[in-house]
Image: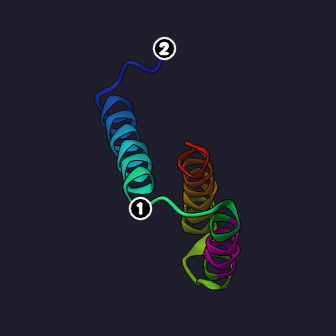
Amino acid sequence: MFETKKFRRAAVVLGIMLLTITLFSLVFSKTVDQCYDDYERCRIRALQSSGGVIATTIQLTACDVGVAACIVAAML
């Protein structure tokens, strides 16, 4: 169904981004409170940006993934 080159490339790029965020969070682990503080700052910056709907949605998604990875790393 979604077997196009663009879809595969997008999936690979997204996977690399998620892996990078996860590894970065594991190396620089924080407390859960620091994770939520960074998450709030990330969301504020994303919502204040003038990048348009798609760019803001991507930034907010990156914030969500980042906080999840940070919390997992903080609990290890």
Which residues are drawn in magenta? 36-44
Q: Position of residue 31 (x, y in %)?
A: 62, 63
Q: Position of residue 27 (x, y in %)?
A: 37, 55
* For residue 35, above or below residue 21: below
* For residue 19, above or below residue 29: above
Quadrant of res 25: bottom left
Residue located at (56% from left, 65% from top) = 59
- In this view, the residue in front, 32 or 68, is 32
- Find numbered disc 2 in the image and state the secondary structure of the residue it sits on: loop
* For residue 70, above or below residue 55: above
Calculate the distance from the C-alpha at mark 2 to the C-alpha at mark 1: 39 Å
Label 1 Cα neighbours within 10 Å, binned few <14 / some 14-19 / many ≥20: few
Is residue 40 one of those drawn in magenta? yes
Viewed as shown, does residue 50 lie left or right of 17?
A: right
What residue is pinned by disc 2?
1
What residue is pinned by disc 1?
28
Query: Majority secondary structure of the magenta segment?
Result: helix
